[in-house]
Amino acid sequence: MLYKFFFKRLLDLVSSIFILLVLSPVFFAVMILLSIANKGSPFFFQKRPGKDEKIFSIIKFKTMNDAKDEQGNLLSDAQRLTKIGGFIRKTSLDEIPQLINVIKGDMSLIGPRPLLVSYLDLYDDFEKKRHNVRPGITGWAQVNGRNAIDWSTKFKLDVYYVENLSFWLDIKIILKTIKNVLISKDISIQPVKKLVDEKREKNASSKNK
């Protein structure tokens, strides 16, 4: 319990500052490359629910440009994903700015990934438990399938983490995260819309019974 309520936050703060300092050359290099590729801001900001569903702005490197069709509508994600953006996402370098979120206290290095605010009405009481801790840059669901697993399994893994949070589980997740990044395992450039549609269909089916 002491780890969960004190040492975890302390380790998050110290580790994030250290990692950000070490990766600062990479941070600035990626920032410059994306500024050129995107012809604008290298950063992506989006509202996400954090601990106790408190809303915060997540910071990531922007891997897609704002290209639009003749009608002024944004092109598909695949069409807007730049070459440098694809590489940055594949290597998970787009996650680096979230260290700022960790330093601010919005996030933890390890915890359930924060999804969109619009998804909040989709959760049942069991799934809402994922918001009992700070969301993380990586988590138990991410090292056990990431976007390759279905919605139900993803949330079961998130809740498992919340209910079994410990120093040793965090160490295990860190080691598996490093391994997955090095071999580019379970990295997907596809949006999680498929998971959301699956959840909406499941909820609709349950209401019709």
Image (cartoon, rainbow, N blue to C red):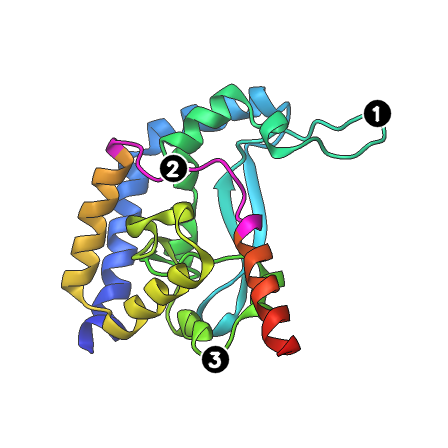
Q: In the orientation shown, which residue stands out farthest toward the front?
A: 209
Q: Which of the two residues, 76 or 12, is positioned nearer the viewer here?
A: 76
Q: State the CA–CA distance, disc 3 to disc 2.
A: 29 Å
Considering only order in the chain, which callout, 1 or 2, is on the residue closer to the N terminus?
Answer: 1
User: What residue is drawn where x is 21% and y is 67%?
Assistant: 7
**Residue 27 percent coordinates (x, y):** 39, 32
Residue 52 vs 202, above or below: the answer is below
Q: Which of the two residues, 63 or 43, is positioned nearer the viewer here?
A: 63
User: Decide: marks 3, 1 in contact (CB < 8 A)?
Assistant: no
Q: In the displayed structure, does residue 183 sit left or right of residue 159? A: left
Which residue carries the number 1 mark?
A: 70
Quadrant of the rendering where the N terminus is positioned: bottom left
What's the magenta region? 182-194
Q: In the orientation shown, which residue stands out farthest toward the left?
A: 168
In the image, is residue 193 part of the stretch drawn in magenta?
A: yes
Considering only order in the chain, which callout, 2 or 3, is on the residue closer to the N terminus?
Answer: 3
Q: In the displayed structure, does residue 107 sit left or right of residue 181? A: right
Considering only order in the chain, which callout, 1 or 3, is on the residue closer to the N terminus?
Answer: 1
Which residue carries the number 3 mark?
A: 125
Q: Which mark is residue 187?
A: 2
Give the amino acid type for the residue marked by disc 3 in the picture: Asp
User: What residue is drawn where x is 48% and y is 80%?
Assistant: 125
Give the amino acid type for the residue marked by disc 2 in the picture: Ile
Mark 2 element type: loop
Q: State the CA–CA distance, disc 2 to disc 1.
A: 32 Å
Quadrant of the rendering where the C terminus is positioned: bottom right
